[in-house]
């Protein structure tokens, strides 16, 4: 498992995938997830035209998915907007609240800031989600024969709106993370599933990937898809979210 351990004044900080983990107390571990956005919104120079609520919703959902993938419970969300609060930041905040409502944590504290000194022509910003994990983080342990699946439809830009019924949901991530047979579930970003395949290879595993899946090796934008490593078979879901066999971990 690729886990980087950084020591600062005797304190160990773990870097696992896109998550940063720090032992908070004997019984809890602090988990930090973050994401940024730029050029997506309804300001004059934005490339993808959507309402700010959409930007806030999908950015928050991505951070929630990252933490849910290791069953960490959110504590606080920090929202930084490089545009004015009225109307951009306010719309983004509404999108965040929608995501938190769906996650079942509508009262989660949200802190943040916006740009009120200058007129901004393009939407940009970032979010950081703080969460806690009970006890220590235990990295997944793979073995030969583990099956690799692509869950959801990799989508970016306007595709996110067009493919909504096929996108990986927060509920799906939670379900997979709780499966005893699911060794690891990884929300994907702009580099597609190839990043995770490379990570397994760097760990010393040989990974066989179906040639038929090459067309799905593309950006998954705001975690619209995930890679799931399963010790067994992953069956189709009732919600219709696509599950495709990607390959397997070899000896």
Image (cartoon, helix red, strand yellow):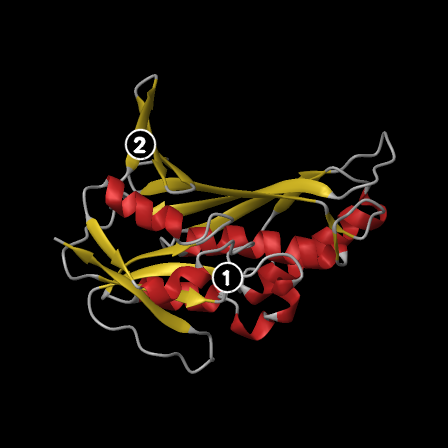
Mark 1 or 2: in front is 1
Q: Which residue is mark 1?
A: 154
Q: Relative to the observer, which residue lies in front, 225 or 67?
A: 225
Percent of width and height locating residue 130: 49, 43
Q: CA distance from mark 1 to mark 2?
A: 28 Å
- Rate crowding at label 1 as few (under 14), some (14 to 19) or many (20 or more) other CA atoms within 10 Å: many
Q: Is residue 227 left or right of residue 208?
A: right
Q: Which residue is mark 2?
A: 4
Residue 181: image quadrant is bottom left
* Residue at screen point 83% across, 34% down: 116
Asked whether residue 230 appears in the rendered view, the answer is: yes
Percent of width and height locating residue 74: 48, 51
Q: Is residue 180 left or right of residue 219?
A: left
* Residue at screen point 14% across, 57% down: 144
Q: Secondary structure at mark 1?
A: loop
Q: Relative to the observer, which residue lies in front, 242 or 76?
A: 242
* Residue at screen point 55% across, 54% down: 221
Percent of width and height locating residue 209: 29, 59
- Rate crowding at label 2 as few (under 14), some (14 to 19) or many (20 or more) other CA atoms within 10 Å: few
Percent of width and height locating residue 170: 49, 64
* Residue at screen point 37% across, 59% down: 227
Considering every residue shown, the one lying at the far front of the view is 211
Q: Quadrant of the N terminus?
A: top left
Q: Relative to the observer, which residue lies in front, 233 or 14?
A: 233
Considering every residue shown, the one lying at the far right of the view is 119
Q: Secondary structure at mark 2?
A: strand
């Amino acid at each position: 498992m690729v886990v980087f351990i950084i020591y600062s004044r005797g304190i160990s900080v773990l870097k696992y995938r896109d998550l940063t983990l720090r032992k908070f107390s004997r019984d809890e571990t602090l988990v930090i997830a973050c994401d940024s956005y730029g050029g997506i919104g309804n300001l004059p120079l934005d490339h993808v035209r959507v309402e700010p609520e959409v930007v806030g919703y999908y950015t928050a959902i991505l951070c929630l998915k990252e933490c849910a993938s290791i069953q960490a419970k959110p504590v606080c969300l920090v929202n930084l907007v490089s545009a004015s609060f009225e109307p951009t930041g306010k719309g983004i905040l509404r999108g965040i609240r929608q995501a938190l409502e769906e996650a079942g944590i509508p009262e989660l504290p949200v802190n943040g800031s916006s740009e009120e000194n200058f007129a901004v022509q393009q939407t940009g910003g970032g979010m950081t989600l703080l969460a806690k994990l009970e006890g220590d983080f235990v990295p997944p342990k793979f073995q030969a024969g583990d099956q690799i699946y692509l869950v959801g439809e990799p989508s970016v830009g306007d595709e996110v709106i067009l493919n909504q019924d096929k996108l990986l949901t927060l509920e799906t991530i939670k379900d997979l993370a709780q499966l005893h047979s699911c060794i690891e579930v990884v929300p994907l970003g702009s580099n597609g599933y190839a990043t995770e395949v490379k990570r397994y290879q760097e760990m010393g595993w040989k990974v066989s990937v179906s040639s038929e899946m090459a067309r799905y090796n593309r950006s998954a934008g705001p975690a619209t898809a995930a890679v799931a490593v399963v010790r067994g078979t992953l069956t189709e879901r009732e919600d219709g979210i696509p599950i495709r066999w990607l390959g397997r971990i070899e000896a």
